[in-house]
Image: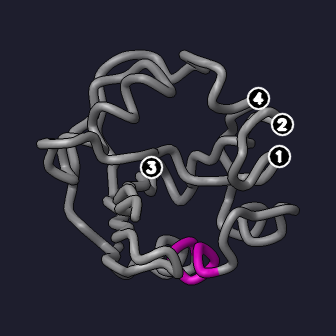
Amino acid sequence: MEVPSDFVGALIVQRQQVLLGRRSAEKVEAAGCWDLIGGRVEAGETFEAACIREIEEEIGVQAEIDGEILRTRVASGAEYRIFRVSRWQGEIRLANDEHSEIGWFSVEQACDLQPLAAVEYIELFQAVASGRTP
């Protein structure tokens, strides 16, 4: 039996806005959905290191993690951790083919995006708007 891969997401925030990417249509999971930047944790890698690596691979910047804001298990049994990121070096850009587009969205805009990869993200976006941690 195959062990499910754990994965990470980055809630990247700047001035009450969140950065989201529309997953490429060729992706197996959540194709065409707006999602956090992130991906699979590789063997021997910490969740934090995976998050930093995925950010660099997908949007071309070196990020600093502010902290973990969510830890959960999904239906497959994989662990999913989301980290808040508000500091990075470099210019954010599409750095590979994981996403067809990326953009900064106000919380209201982010909550209304369709399709959104996970409706649970809305609570995270609203926390940004209210100034609560995440």
Asked whether disc 1 touches disc 4, contact meaning CB atoms under 8 Å apart, the reply is yes
Q: Amino acid at mark 2?
A: Ala
Which stretch is magenta?
120-125
Decide which of 31, 22 is in the foreground and name it. 31
Drawn side of residue 54 relative to residue 67, left or right: right
Q: Which mark is residue 32?
A: 1
**Tag 4 or tag 1, which sits nearer the N-term?**
1
- Residue occupied by mark 4: 100
Q: CA distance from mark 1 to mark 2?
A: 5 Å
Disc 2: CA contacts within 10 A as few (<14), some (14-19) or many (>=20): some
Q: Secondary structure at mark 3?
A: strand
- Residue occupied by mark 3: 12
Q: Amino acid at mark 1?
A: Gly
Asked whether disc 4 touches disc 2, contact meaning CB atoms under 8 Å apart, the reply is yes
Q: Quadrant of the N terminus?
A: bottom left
Asked whether disc 2 touches disc 3, contact meaning CB atoms under 8 Å apart, the reply is no
Nearer the observer: mark 4 or 3; the answer is: 4
Q: CA distance from mark 2 to mark 3?
A: 22 Å
**Tag 2 or tag 4, which sits nearer the N-term?**
2
Asked whether disc 4 touches disc 3, contact meaning CB atoms under 8 Å apart, the reply is no
- Residue occupied by mark 2: 25
